[in-house]
Amino acid sequence: MRIDELRGVSCKSVAAVEYDEPGKDPIYAVGTAIAFSDGTRLSAQFWRLLKDRKPVISIFDHRQKYGLPAPVDAIQTLNAELAGKVIASAEMLSTGDLRFHFERDVELEVFNFTAFEIWELAFPDGATELSNYALER
């Protein structure tokens, strides 16, 4: 895994990726694209953000109303928390999950719930790491 190469790189931006799949539950119709300062891109479907080791928000909160005046925009919250922050460490767990530790005690966990491609790391040189292939190593 080349994920170690992301140490010292900052998060440039976070954006939603809309999937146009008829009949798909709206929560699964949104992916997340994260751009890093070195040109690396992460595409992920399932994630959770922690701050001071406590859950802040996850993709499962996206578009939920929870009795609030407006639905939650988890992508916007993730962008607000990560943009400009530097990665202190990054690792892939034995499950294929990714864990990014950012400065100021902020963590992003990217989950691999399946044996299929659920996240992708695309590096500036064209190399990619895919969740299902990463587990084969």
Image (cartoon, grey):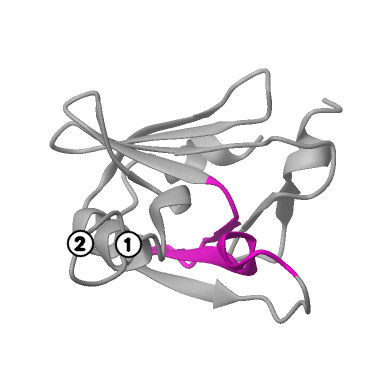
Q: Nearer the viewer, residue 57 or 44?
A: 57
* Amino acid tagged 1: Lys
Q: Quadrant of residue 43?
A: bottom right
Kindly identify the residue that appears in the image at 25 percent across and 47 percent down.
86
Q: Looking at the image, which residue sits at the far top?
A: 94
Q: Is residue 63 left or right of residue 53?
A: right
Q: Which residues are magenta?
A: 24-46
Mark 1: secondary structure: loop
Kindly identify the residue that appears in the image at 72 percent across and 55 percent down.
128
Magenta span has 43? yes
Instruction: Please tell me whether residue 95 is drawn above or below residue 43 in the rendered image.
Output: above
Q: Looking at the image, which residue sits at the far left?
A: 104
Q: Is residue 24 left or right of residue 29?
A: right
* Mark carried by residue 65: 1
- Label 1 crowd (10 A; few <14 / some 14-19 / many >=20): few
**Where does residue 127 sit, x and y in percent of width and height?**
72, 58
* Amino acid tagged 2: Leu
Q: Nearer the viewer, residue 9 or 121?
A: 121
Kindly identify the residue that appears in the image at 41 percent across and 66 percent down.
63
Q: Nearer the viewer, residue 119 or 127?
A: 119
